[in-house]
Image: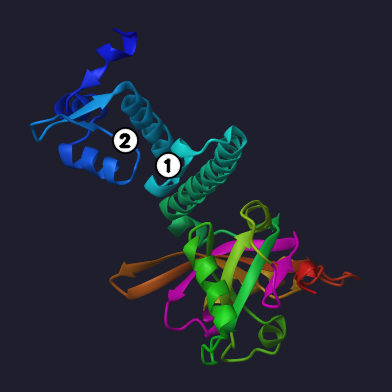
Amino acid sequence: MKPEDHYHYSTSELARYYGLTAKGLAFYEDKGIISPRRIPGSKYREFTLVDCYHLYDSKFYSNCGFSLAETADLIQHKNLAFVQNELHQKSLQIQQEILYKERLKHHVDRIAGLMAHIEELTQQFQVVNSPSFYRLFVRHYCSPHSSTPEQSREFARWNHDVPINVASLKYSREELLQGAPFLNVGIGNIILEEDFQRLNYSPSSRTEYLPSCLCVYTVIQGSEEELYLPGRLAPCLDFISKNHYQLAGDPFTSMITVANTPEGRIRFDEVWFPVEKAGAAAPCKSPQTSPEAG
């Protein structure tokens, strides 16, 4: 008797060892992963050491994220280099998924932290160098939301990753300086430059690069349905004027949340006002269309 002849298992034994049901084992058999022997004269099946190896491999590949069809192919494949390459590619995919989860956690923590201090942040103004961003323009507030199929796919890709990127408003410096009663606000999404690059976003004719710039930073609030009114920006514009700064570019925002309050639904945004000292010779570098977009 060969040593492997001692390795014969019933359906219930193998199911218990690998956390499967009898139907689960039948499913694996149907997919060609295991090949039990039918016991003559009975309805029972007998499993061998080879079946154990295949179930072990199936757990390995399944836990790596391979589908059952992919698992069956890998188990039966006779080219070890092919299997090695598939594992290498899966490792790269897992690494990207870990990066995504890390960035997702970072932004969840950041937004929760802003929410915890949101009332005091709306009363504070800071002169800072803004982060570098990429921004996707979707439409103007006073314009219809029309897009090509390609633009719709691009917008869906950005929305898939919220809150790594978030909704964003962009105000016109010229309209603000002219004292316009209504602002044709630019609607879009915004993402940190490092996330744009590390998560393999693609530039397009609708993305622009917002380089780091001297800004007045604060948190603004207002009705979610009255984004076009300049009143929410007035306190920051007053701060800029009183501290001898002047607008040097278009203010832009990064949405924190829309909250239900007794006064209605209120939108809270971080906002950066590009500034320079009043009378300065060179303005803050203006936003640029993504150079890769051509």
Identify the image quadrant of the C terminus. bottom right
Place of residue 19 in the rendered image (x, y in percent of width and height, measured from the top left)? 23, 31
Residue at 65% x, 89% y: name it: 179
Residue that carries the numbered disc 2 in the rendered image: 34
- Give yes or no for contact between labels 2 and 1 (Cβ–Cβ under 8 Å): no
The residue sitting at the right extreme is 281
Amino acid type indicated by mark 2? Ile
Q: Which residues are magenta?
A: 203-231
**Taking 59 as reference, is 262 above or below it?**
below
Residue that carries the numbered disc 1 in the rendered image: 71
Q: Nearer the viewer, residue 65 or 41?
A: 41
Please tell me whether mark 2 or mark 1 is closer to you in this view. Answer: 2
Residue at 32% x, 13% y: name it: 4
**Taking 41 as reference, is 237 above or below it?**
below
Amino acid type indicated by mark 1? Thr
**Taking 58 as reference, is 73 above or below it?**
below
